[in-house]
Amino acid sequence: MSDAEISELKEKIKKYNKAYYQDDTPLVDDAEYDILLRRLQTLEGASEDGIDPDSPTQNVGSEPAEGFQKITHGRPMLSLDNGFDRGDIEDFIKRIKKFLNYDPLKRLELTAEPKIDGLSCSITYEKGKLVKAATRGNGTIGEDVTDNIRTISDIPQQFRGETLPDLIEIRGEVYITHADFAKMNAQAEQMGGKIFANPRNAAAGSLRQLNSQITASRPLRFFAYAWGAASDIPFSTQSAMMGWLKEVGFVVNPEFQICADAKDLLHFYESISERRAQLGYDIDGVVYKVNDLGLQERLGYVSRHPRWAIAHKFAAEQATTLIKDIQIQVGRTGALTPVAKLEPVTVGGVVVSNATLHNSEEIKRKDVRIGDTVIIQRAGDVIPQILAVVLDKRPEDSEAYLFPETCPVCGSPAERSGDDIVTRCTGGMKCDAQITERLKHFVSKKAFDIDGLGEKQIELFWEKGLVKTPADIFTLQARDQKNIHKIKNFEGFGEKSTRKLFDAIDKKRIIDLDRFIFALGIRYVGETISRGLARQYGSWEKIYDLIQKVIAENYHGPAFAELSDIGGTQMAVAARALCAFFADKENDQHVKDILQHVTTRPLEAQDFASPIAGKSVVFTGSLQKLTRAEAKYKAEQLGARVTGTVTKKTDYVIAGADAGSKLDKARSLGVEVLTEEEWLEFCNS
Ligand code: IVH
């Protein structure tokens, strides 16, 4: 009897919840609602079956005491590469086909759907039951918003149907419709509540609430469009998966469509652009994905983006405002970047008060002056740009802007060399701006990533004379013990956070080799190149030896060829910059000083549990099953180092059809040679 009553009450309350929280049209008054809810609580308390986590008694109003718990995603939540015009999309398709060795004339099925401008979430289901939910956070770790997600009626607590994977993370976008947003702000205005700038902020503000009752009162919605970690994936195409997501109880975007080629995609884009205002919710573009999941798997990822998808973004939004001043910023590599200080103006929901002017040429070309009224544009997360000057509004006494000939920070001459469009401060390590910017880069997220040591702290320690070079970071504690002015007495510090800072620094005395290289902040030597170098050479000593050889050979010998050989046209440029950095005695000494305190950790074979981890391989001849790019990617994914030259140290040469001199060399050196088939089998073993 009471079981039947429990389920009846649950259904009733859920219906009332939806009417009240989602539709803003209560079906019963508060008093009646409370009586029902309390009755349900009583019955559940007495029930032997325990309380169902789906029950409305569990879902509304649970209140996490403190800030959010953290959840590590089963698979990182990545972002999408962007394209802005027809050419970008055609290139995207060409790239994919080339990577897959797909007949360029054959159609490749892609899907198209709107890119929702909300906030992404990952919701974990075990055997079809919602168990946890997290915001994107930093992509690896998000905030636990399980209780809040449970209040959204577009999201099932339990999958419908038979297909219940042991585990699957469902991903999608939480958003608010235009109508609900207007209603919400009108209400807030009346009641003196918080007014949100745009639906995206409103959605984020509503989901990231510590009190899920507040979330429940907000009109949040959800479109499912992807998945993360999964014990099994029931279908083999993106479109079939979307169908399945709908079947199990999610809302998927009704505009979702399968397209046969670039023409279809662009047609979809046009159609959505025209109807953008009528969709009823904010979108900032459309997303194209390869439909076949097998191909998606083969295509894999490039740094933080899937290679199999792209966002086709809408043209940016524009606004008109006034330039109050032009200031020059000096970057890590000495680049002088002019920045326009603007009369603050809202562009596409964001207040903009700075815009980049890029370089002196740009200022000259557009004849931008202080006091000018300008049209600015903002596209996605990109720094706002100045499009043009409104000449009608130019003050009569206006004068052309004179680009400084000296560094505004250190006074050294500022110059342009060769065909470099950028004016650079020639002060090098004599320029405070360059030093502090390098220090900030050194401790940044993708470099040493020292907890509690960010840009603000670097500036403070710099001003106090405590940190002048990266190596100084590692002697801070020892010096602090002797100093009269203790860090713990600085504003914003104290005993505990000073202790924590020292501990955080100690933790980084052993650092991944790729992070170490990246942290040096050498021009052109970014994340990917740093990782490539670390993979290729395994230890700092080897890299450094090679750099010394390049310098000795004056960049013209075999050492330079070897260093440039790890692929990509970028590498030759980076190799040159890397060696030039170390040819400077001061830089060289700085790095030696760091290494007095820091040990680099090679990207060891044990980082990858695969039979080819740590092996050095060379591909030669033409491969049948894989393209070169794909073969290289796959090998690197499994932890191998792919090079172009066969040496004694090469572990395997994979010889395709018509292999030539590299194969001969492998044979003469006694390097093991595999066919493409053998190689694939070996990779999969
Ligand atoms: S697919 C591997 N589809 O856009 C990434 N993302 O810029 C898979 N987004 O972080 C994401 N609408 O928050 C995908 N229909 C859609 C989307 C979408 C919005 C967001 C998502 C992602 C961001 C990437």
Image: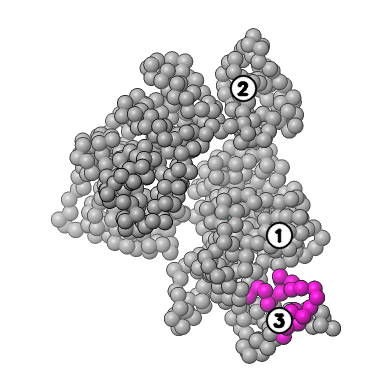
> From which residue to which does the magenta span run?
39-60
Instruction: Out of 666 and 99, give the one closest to the viewer.
Output: 666
Instruction: Locate the C terminus and report the quarter of the image it occupies.
Output: top right
Is ligand 1 less than 8 Å from the beta carbon at label 3? no
In the rendered structure, which amino acid carries the disc numbered 3? Gln
In the rendered structure, which disc, 3 or 1, sits on the residue that comes first in sequence?
A: 3
Instruction: Out of 394 and 624, give the one closest to the viewer.
Output: 624
142 relative position to 422: left or right: right
- Between marks 2 and 1 in the image, the one whose residue lies nearer the viewer: 1
Q: Which residue matches tag 1?
A: 125
- Between marks 3 and 1 in the image, the one whose residue lies nearer the viewer: 3
Quick check: marks 2 and 1 in contact, CB under 8 Å? Answer: no
Query: Residue 314 placed where, x, y %?
Result: 50, 55
Query: Residue 30 placed where, x, y %?
Result: 62, 88
Q: Height in image: 198 above or below 647? A: below
| Residue at horizontal 70 percent and vertical 63 percent from the top | 130
Q: Which residue matches tag 2?
A: 618
- Between marks 2 and 3 in the image, the one whose residue lies nearer the viewer: 3
Question: What is the secondary structure assignment of the residue under circle 1?
Answer: strand
Is ligand 1 less than 8 Å from the beta carbon at label 2? no
Q: Which residue matches tag 3?
A: 41
In the rendered structure, which disc, 2 or 3, sits on the residue that comes first in sequence?
A: 3
Q: Would you say residue 166 sits in the magenta stretch? A: no
Q: Residues within 10 Å of mark 3 (few under 14, many from 20)?
A: some
Question: Marks 3/1: CA distance?
Answer: 25 Å
In which image quadrant can residue 634 be found? top right
Instruction: Locate the N terminus and report the quarter of the image it occupies.
Output: bottom right
In the rendered structure, which amino acid carries the disc numbered 1? Tyr
